[in-house]
């Protein structure tokens, strides 16, 4: 519709306004006043922005230089990291030297205290939901066909169908009240299987 078309320039501007570090393949935070902040090391922020960037490329038939480098680097362990049990890590580390080391150290301290595990459990479905949307729209996208991505997504998906994981979601503040499994589970099950 004509009303939808008027938002296309806004969408393009929004995507291009986010500064992208080609060194770390991560986006910086864009403040509401338009100023650029530091790189955002929160994985789900990076993943969702990357998926929306890629889907925008498809629907607008326009290329954004940052999308493919972001997804190429997701296959590196410190960007898209998964525990042995299949839990997607909340932090995403680029290759920014001292800053990356600081954020990795800070993350490890929080992991030891257990403060990130509840977030990671609550965001597991939310992260997989974004990948399910990408796979639904672009099933042959190179990132999704890469052996590393296939292994990580399969391991992450296997976890969500365990009784233990589902039991932990019930009282998780980042799950039902925040990222509803009732909406995410069906799409993940349909798109990622």
Image (cartoon, rainbow, N blue to C red):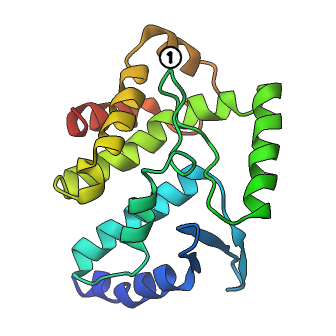
Quadrant where the image shows the C terminus: top left
Q: Residue at x 42, y 30 (%)?
A: 156
Image location (x, y in percent) of residue 54: 33, 68
Question: What residue is shown at x 24% (from left), y 58% (from top)?
Answer: 142
Viewed as shown, does residue 138 lie left or right of 187?
Answer: left
Q: Is residue 60 left or right of residue 77?
A: left
- Residue 151 appears in the rendering: yes
**Rendering coords of residue 121 (x, y %):** 58, 28
Q: Is residue 153 depicted above or below 37 in this figure?
A: above
Relative image position of residue 95 (x, y in whole percent): 63, 62
Question: Which corner quadrant holds the N terminus?
Answer: bottom left
Secondary structure under tag 1 reads helix
Residue 173 seen in the current view? no
Image vertical order of residue 155 relative to residue 130, above or below: above
- Residue 153 figure quarter: top left
Say which residue label 1 marks: 165
The quarter holding residue 89 reads: top right
Which residue corresponds to the image point at 35% horizontal and 48% vertical from the top-left?
A: 131
Point out the residue furthest to the front here: 97
| Total number of numbered discs in the rendering | 1
């Amino acid at each position: 519709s004509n009303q939808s078309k008027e938002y296309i320039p806004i969408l393009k501007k929004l995507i291009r306004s986010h500064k992208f570090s080609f060194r770390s393949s991560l986006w910086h935070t864009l403040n509401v006043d338009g100023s650029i902040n530091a790189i955002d090391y929160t994985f789900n922020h990076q993943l969702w922005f990357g998926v929306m960037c890629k889907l925008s490329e498809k629907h607008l038939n326009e290329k954004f230089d940052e999308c493919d480098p972001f997804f190429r680097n997701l296959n590196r362990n410190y960007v898209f990291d998964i525990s042995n049990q299949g839990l997607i890590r909340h932090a995403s580390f680029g290759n920014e030297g001292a800053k990356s080391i600081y954020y990795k150290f800070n993350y490890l301290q929080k992991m030891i205290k257990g403060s990130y595990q509840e977030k990671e459990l609550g965001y597991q479905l939310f992260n997989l939901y974004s990948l399910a949307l990408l796979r639904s729209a672009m099933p042959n996208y190179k990132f999704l066909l890469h052996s590393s991505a296939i292994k990580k997504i399969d391991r992450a998906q296997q976890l969500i169908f365990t009784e233990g994981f589902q039991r932990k979601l019930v009282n998780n503040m980042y799950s039902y009240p925040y990222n509803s499994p009732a909406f995410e589970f069906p799409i993940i099950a349909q798109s990622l299987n």
